[in-house]
Image (cartoon, rainbow, N blue to C red):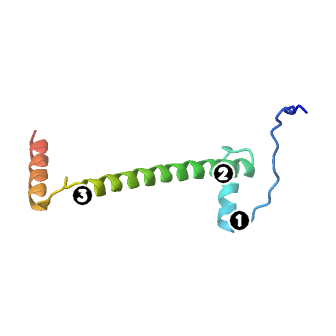
Amino acid sequence: MEWQSLPSKETQMSLNVSLPVELENRVRGHVASGLYGSASEVIREALRVFEAYQALQASSLSSLKADIAKGVADAKAGRVGVVDMNAIKKQGRAALKAKVSA
């Protein structure tokens, strides 16, 4: 038996969503501004932006976890030492002073 692919046809799902009055007013305001043609367009754009935000958060978290793992590995391998915060502050202040007076 041979399977054939049917041509893909974009379908739209109808979905009713309840919003608090404040959010409803904001959606209506975006439509009234002319930037969007319908409430559906506003919601679709909001979902796209939210998904992009979530992807960025996931990427940032992944990067943070990698940095922590590297730090832990460095500590276990003895590649870390005591940090003199006063010396770091002094060095930073000197660098800032040199930059400002330049």
Which-is-in-front pick, marks 2 and 1? Answer: 1
Relative vertical location of residue 82 with respect to residue 100 in this rendering, above or below: below
Q: Tell me what residue is drawn at x 82 percent, y 35 percent.
A: 8
Pointer 2 or 1: first along the chain: 1
Crowding around mark 2 (Cα neighbors within 10 Å: few <14, some 14 to 19, many 20+) is: some
Question: Is mark 3 in CB contact (under 8 Å) with mark 2?
Answer: no
Say which amino acid is labelled 2: His
Which-is-in-front pick, marks 1 and 3? Answer: 3
Relative vertical location of residue 56 with respect to residue 18 in this rendering, above or below: above
Asked which quadrant contains residue 101, the reply is top left
CA separation, marks 2 and 1? 15 Å
Question: Is mark 2 in CB contact (under 8 Å) with mark 1?
Answer: no
**Residue beneath label 1, please?**
19
Q: Position of residue 89 (x, y in %)?
A: 13, 57
Say which amino acid is labelled 1: Leu
Q: Tell me what residue is drawn at x 49 percent, y 53 percent.
A: 57
**Residue beneath label 2, please?**
30
Pointer 1 or 3: first along the chain: 1
Q: Tell me what residue is drawn at x 56 percent, y 47 percent.
A: 52
35 to the left or right of 68: right
Q: Position of residue 98 (x, y in %)?
A: 9, 43
The quadrant of the rendering that contains the N terminus is top right
56 to the left or right of 7: left
**Residue beneath label 3, please?**
75
Asked which quadrant contains residue 90, the reply is bottom left
Crowding around mark 1 (Cα neighbors within 10 Å: few <14, some 14 to 19, many 20+) is: few
Q: Position of residue 13 (x, y in %)?
A: 81, 50
Pointer 3 or 2: first along the chain: 2
